[in-house]
C-alpha cells in the first residue's frame, strides 16, 4: 500500500494548498456521504488529524465522487506493477477493504484498513491478512483460497521479478504453509491456527506478510 498511499499524498502536496480543519470536515461529510468527521476517524484509527487530512485529499484527488469501485481500484493499482498482471490480486485486495460488501470503498473503509496495515498490532495485522486469504469469508482458509492469493501475487510481480519461476512453485509454498498451519489436519486453517503458526515461525511470518510490500 506504500505505493498507493505515496501517490495519493504526493499528488495532494503538488496540487492542493493547505486548508483549514472546518473545510476538510465539511468535505468529508458531503463527498464521502458519511457522518464521521476528523475527530471520530482520529479516535477510530492510529492516524493524527493532519495525517487524515492528507490521506483524504489524496483519496478525493483520485476519486472525486468519494467512493472507489473495483475497476477504478484495479486501474490505480496496475500502474505500480507494469511488468505483471495485478488485476486478480487487486480484486482480492479490494474485497478485503470493502468490508460492507457493497462493491465500493469509501474513505472510512480505506483509512480503517490502512490504519491496521501500517500501525496496527501484530495480531491486528495477522487478522487482516487472514481475512484477505479467506476469500469466501466462511472463517477458514482452504488450500484453494491460499493458492489463489499466492498465484495472484506471483502474477502481479511479473516475469522480471521471478524469471525462472516454475508453474508449481506457488502450490509448493501453499503445501508448506498448510503443513505448518493446519495443526489438526482437517484441510482448513482457522484464524487461531493462522495466527499461532505465523507467530511461531519467523520465515512464515515474512512470507505471509509479503502483501505489505505489494500494497
Image (cartoon, rainbow, N blue to C red):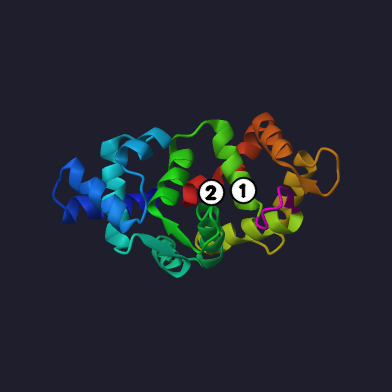
**Residue highlighted by disc 2:** 211
In the image, residue 154 sits, relative to residue 187, either above or below, namely: below
Looking at the picture, how far across and down is residue 81, in whole percent? 44, 62
Number of labels in the image equals 2
Front position among marks 1 and 2 = 1
Q: Can residue 42 be found in the magenta stretch?
A: no
In the picture provided, is 63 more to the left or to the right than 188?
A: left
Which residue appears at 61% of the width and 37% of the height?
205
137, 2: nearer the viewer: 137
Which residue appears at 30% of the width and 51% of the height?
29
Residue 163 visible to an observer of this rendering: no
Q: CA distance from mark 1 to mark 2?
A: 13 Å
In the image, residue 184 sits, relative to residue 167, either above or below, namely: above
Looking at the picture, how far across and down is residue 102, in whole percent? 52, 62
Is label 1 in a helix, a strand or a loop?
A: helix
Image quadrant assignment for residue 105 = bottom left
22, 215: nearer the viewer: 22
Residue 93 visible to an observer of this rendering: yes
In the picture provided, is 121 more to the left or to the right than 56?
A: right
First in sequence, mark 1 or 2: give its number: 1
**Residue highlighted by disc 1:** 131
Q: Residues within 10 Å of mark 1 (few under 14, many from 20)?
A: many
Is label 2 in a helix, a strand or a loop?
A: helix
In the picture provided, is 48 more to the left or to the right than 125?
A: left
Range shown magenta: 135-142
167, 103: nearer the viewer: 103
Give the main secondary structure of the magenta stretch: loop
Which residue appears at 29% of the width and 51% of the height?
28
Image quadrant assignment for residue 191 = top right
Q: Give yes or no for contact between labels 1 and 2 (Cβ–Cβ under 8 Å).
A: no
Q: Residues within 10 Å of mark 2 (few under 14, many from 20)?
A: some
Looking at the picture, how far across and down is residue 138, in whole percent? 71, 52
Amino acid at each position: 500500500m506504500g505505493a498507493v498511499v505515496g501517490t495519493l499524498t504526493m499528488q495532494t502536496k503538488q496540487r492542493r494548498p493547505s486548508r483549514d480543519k472546518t473545510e476538510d470536515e465539511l468535505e468529508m461529510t458531503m463527498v464521502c456521504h458519511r457522518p464521521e468527521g476528523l475527530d471520530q476517524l482520529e479516535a477510530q484509527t492510529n492516524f493524527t488529524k493532519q495525517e487524515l487530512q492528507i490521506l483524504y485529499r489524496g483519496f478525493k484527488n483520485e476519486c472525486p465522487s468519494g467512493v472507489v469501485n473495483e475497476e477504478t481500484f484495479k486501474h490505480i493499482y496496475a500502474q505500480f506493477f507494469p511488468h505483471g498482471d495485478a488485476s486478480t490480486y487487486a480484486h482480492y485486495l479490494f474485497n478485503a477493504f470493502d468490508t460492507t460488501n457493497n462493491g465500493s470503498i469509501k474513505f472510512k473503509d480505506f483509512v480503517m484498513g490502512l490504519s491496521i496495515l501500517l500501525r496496527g498490532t501484530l495480531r491486528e495485522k495477522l487478522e487482516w491478512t487472514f481475512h484477505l486469504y479467506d476469500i469466501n469469508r466462511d472463517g477458514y482458509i482452504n488450500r484453494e483460497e491460499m493458492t489463489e492469493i499466492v498465484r495472484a501475487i506471483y502474477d502481479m510481480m511479473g516475469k522480471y521479478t521471478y524469471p525462472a519461476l516454475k508453474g508449481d512453485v506457488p502450490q509448493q509454498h501453499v503445501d508448506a504453509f498448510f503443513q505448518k498451519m493446519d495443526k489438526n489436519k482437517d484441510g482448513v486453517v482457522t484464524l487461531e491456527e493462522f495466527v499461532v503458526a505465523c507467530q511461531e515461525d519467523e520465515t512464515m511470518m515474512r512470507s505471509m506478510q509479503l502483501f505489505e510490500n505489494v500494497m
